[in-house]
Image (tube, rainbow, N blue to C red):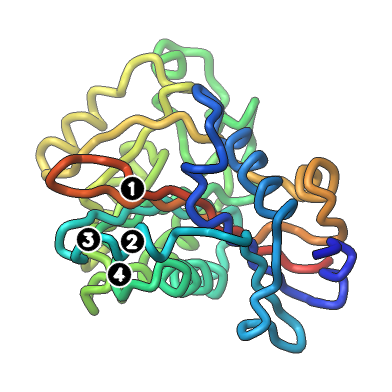
Amino acid sequence: MPLENLQQYLDVVINTGNVLSVNKKAGQKTSEELVDCLKATLDAASIDVAKAGITSVKVTRSSDDLKEKVTEHERANVKIGAKLFLNTSSTGNLKSAIETLFEVLGVECLDNLILAYHPQGRTTTNGVAVNGGDSDETKESVMDWTGGHSDAIRDLKALWKEMEQYAIEKKICQLGIADLDVNSLKELYSTSEFHPSIAQINISTCCVVPPPLQEFCHQNDIQLLTHSDPEEILSKETLSGELDVKNFSPKWTIRFQVHVKCRGVLAAKGYVVGASRE
């Protein structure tokens, strides 16, 4: 499919499908893996005509085996987890990402979903929120997740409320959050109806997991995990330059993994990206 054909649409969803068979590179950074997977998709892309509308279109990779991998085993025997990367406080984008993933996977529920929300306008240095100091606490990455963005917590709570609805309806079993400092996590926890049960912290910016964060997670039965994902996983410059999808800005990116429970085998992995024409 010629990429210039995308210009007739206002919104595009790019589904990489199962990338385990097309991306064999080991040790890649998350953003590098995403770009390679999107390139493989766009190089062998087709428009899902049945899903193409007047203003929106879904782009998939030809000869993808994702649905087959998901249905090889009974749903109860597979664990499906996802991470949603969001840089705007749009509940519409969040819902669009989740509903699109359900459709892509052909399932009605997820085992877990982790939200990585980093509000635009935060004060950052190399992608790390800065709290203005150079104390030992800063070196241990006890940082202010809000980065000086006054509405960050309010916006996060609105996003979380939308996620809670999926949990209440049993469409998502566990909700998780990435990169919050302990004070932000406490505030989110205290005001939520469906508490976060997973908290991720970025190992690339954190030499030592802050003891207050460890303690809070331990006291409230929150699984504390590490990751090395960037705050902005896909920029509009990368989308336009490396991927040649011009005049579009990414709205959200969601990464999914499908594991066979009894064996712990990764059966499928992929990305879905939502973008809008500028």
Q: Total of numbered circles in the picture? A: 4
Query: Where does the image place residue 14, in percent across and percent down from the top left?
Result: 64, 62
Query: Where does the image place residue 263, in percent across and percent down from the top left?
Result: 16, 41
Query: Where does the image place residue 89, in percent across and percent down from the top left?
Result: 56, 63
Q: Picture quarter containing residue 2?
A: bottom right
Marking on residue 164 = 4
Q: Which residue is mark 1?
A: 267
Quadrant location of the N terminus in the rendered image: bottom right
Q: CA distance from mark 3 to mark 1?
A: 10 Å
Q: CA distance from mark 1 to mark 4?
A: 28 Å
Marking on residue 16 = none
Marking on residue 70 = 2
Q: Secondary structure at mark 1?
A: strand
Q: Residue furthest bottom?
A: 54
Query: Where does the image place residue 34, in percent across and percent down from the top left?
Result: 60, 42
Q: Residue at x 84, y 61 (%)?
A: 3
Q: Which residue is mark 3?
A: 73
Residue type at mark 2?
Val
Give the mark, 3 or 4, whose residue is nearer the N terminus.
3
Give the mark, 1 or 2, whose residue is nearer the N terminus.
2
Give the mark, 1 or 4, whose residue is nearer the N terminus.
4
Residues at discs 1 and 2 in contact (Cβ within 8 Å): yes
Residue type at mark 3?
His
Whether residue 190 appears in this view of the structure is: no
Residues at discs 2 and 3 in contact (Cβ within 8 Å): no
Other-residue count near label 2 (Cα within 10 Å), few / some / many at <14 / 14–19 / ≥20: many
